[in-house]
Image (cartoon, coloured by chain):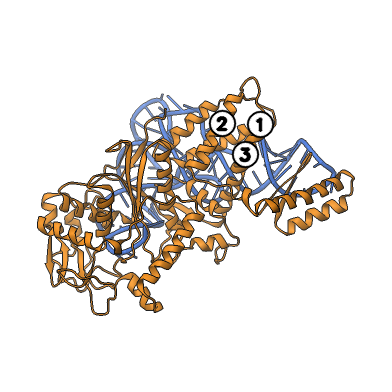
Amino acid sequence: MQNDFIIYNTLSRKKEKFEPINPPFVGLYVCGPTVYGDAHLGHARPAITFDLLFRYLQHMGYKVRYVRNITDVGHLENDADEGEDKIAKKARLEQLEPMEIVQYYSDRYHKNMEELNVLKPSIEPRASGHIIEQQQMIDKILEAGYAYEKDGSVYFDVEKYSKDYNYGKLSGRVLDDLKSNTRELAGQDEKRNPFDFALWKKAKPEHIMRWPSVWSDGFPGWHLECSVMSTKYLGEKFDIHGGGMDLLFPHHESEIAQSTAANGSESVKYWMHNNMITIKGQKMGKSLGNFITLDEFFTGKHELLDQAYAPMTVRFFILQAHYRSTLDFSPEALVASEKGLQRLLTAVKSIDKIKPQKESTVNVNELKEKCYAAINDDLNSPILISHLFDGVKMINSLVENKQSITAKDLEELKQLYNSFVFDILGLRDDNSSIGGNKLNEVVDLILNIRYNAKSNKDFATSDKIRDELQSLGFVIKDRKDGSDWELK
RNA sequence: GGUCAGUUGGCCGAGUGGCUAGGCUCUGGUCUGCAAAACCAGCUACGGCGGUUCGAAUCCGCCACUGACCUCCA
């Protein structure tokens, strides 16, 4: 029924038709968070982008295994050799066990993801739970001759690998450029070349996150976990690997190299990368310190924010831009999303008010086809949303009987909005459930009293009720025969 | 310095060689006891300079600017 699903493959730098390796199964791997701090707006982007992908693949009927890792071993701080483990550093700072930090921030991440209505992945493996597998992969790479050991550490031999394969095929790097451009960093004397990267790193005495191995007491290198866990759960060949654009190089490039070196062939068919969220034109990121955490958005507690933003506002904000474009954050842009989302959700609710007629003067099928065409075109959610807004006008004119629709088309329309708004875009109408049924009944009761007062032209009473409710945060929307309300 | 992106109306953001998304703001209107909300309508932009073309914001060249990656980063 649907047309071809097209996705942009970073590997080919082209849009390609999506054809799973083993239909109806689809393997999807996405780089998850390093849990050493609260998730910020930037973390929401890949989560939501690939949630959209996950949801749409399922909508199309695929059986998807979605693997999103948690990096809890920690990447190396500063540089691959002399830095200390990020998690370990934080742990020492706060006098906590590393795993305590990991647990704390994992829980908070999960809470944020739930608030954003991001579906749980099928498997969420942790790097620390796959040390043995990582060591096994190092063995394979050593056996294949693409790695070397030096003083208890093991490094990937990029130059050797480049003779047989193409290191740089994903990111477009050229080894010669890397040679001349790679910064000379202190303490790199163990490596044959500065662009070699660690597969296993011997731990220093003060380094508390460590595991025994034949090479040394140490810890795995920072690209290895993804190669290992994707292979373990999705096989040596799988369909889609996603992540942020900032991981393209060196992380994903090195993943390809590791998997190829160990298995003899490439593992990923489609590479997908989401772009960055910017703030004042600059990437929002940890290193620049210009990030706003998701909790700060949800509570409004940040100097750049003058109000709280609901998780669904943040989700909608992100979906209103294409995932491969940068998205510039500003309070104004978020307010715009908040209002737009409200308008969309209100319209969806009012579909139930439409009364079917004998004929349709609106074209539901055309709308439906446009929606599928948009999502099929590399997950073009902004275009999809623009069509949904066109449909909002249609819905509103149907509610006001300016257009008519048959029962069959009406059912179709309702399904269309349910599918796209809730199932695929993953939006949620938080207002309809706020406070539970009792509150709804109480507010309705009060508004009924006000309506009676109004009918009796007792405006003093009716306005008092309205004003007091408003000061409690209710928005009162008068209709001819009563009032609607919502909690702001 | 190298590699790669981008520069769209007040703001955020799509997009295509001609038919000139969408949201928000703003303006006008409808509705209304007033207000709010809601709804309707209007607002016609594509960094600069050349070129290709009947026609370019969309293709090509040059320039300018911004950003990403090259070091942990989603």
Q: Is residue B38 left or right of residue A234?
A: right
* Residue B18 sits above or below residue A182 on the image: above
Q: Is residue A28 visible?
A: yes
Above/below status of A201 relative to A411: below
Q: Which residue does the image show at 74% across and 52% down from the upper left?
A: A443
Disc 1 residue type? Ile
User: In the rendering, at what x and y percent does residue A207 appear?
Assistant: 27, 76
Q: Earlier in the sequence, mark 1 or mark 2?
A: 1
Q: Amino acid at mark 2?
A: Leu
Judged from this view, the residue extending furthest toward the top is A358
Q: Is residue A258 left or right of residue A327?
A: left
Which residue occupies the foreground of this view, A265 or A25?
A: A25
Q: What colour do you see for chain A?
A: orange
| Residue A347 circle label | 3
Q: Is residue B9 left or right of residue A135?
A: right
Dot 1 and dot 2 residues touching (CB under 8 Å): yes
Q: Measured from the top left, where is residue A441 in percent x and y? A: 73, 50
Q: Earlier in the sequence, mark 3 or mark 1?
A: 3
> What is the chain identity of the residue bearing mark 2?
A
Residue A154 image offset from top left, x and y in percent: 16, 66
Closer to the observer: label 3 or label 1? 1
For disc 3, the chain is: A
Of the chain colours in the picture, the one used for chain B is: blue
Q: What is the quadrant of the C terminus of chain A in the image?
A: bottom right
The residue indicated by pointer 1 is A354
User: What residue is shown with label 2?
Assistant: A413
Determine the residue positioned at 70% across, 50% down: A440
Q: Chain of mark 1?
A: A
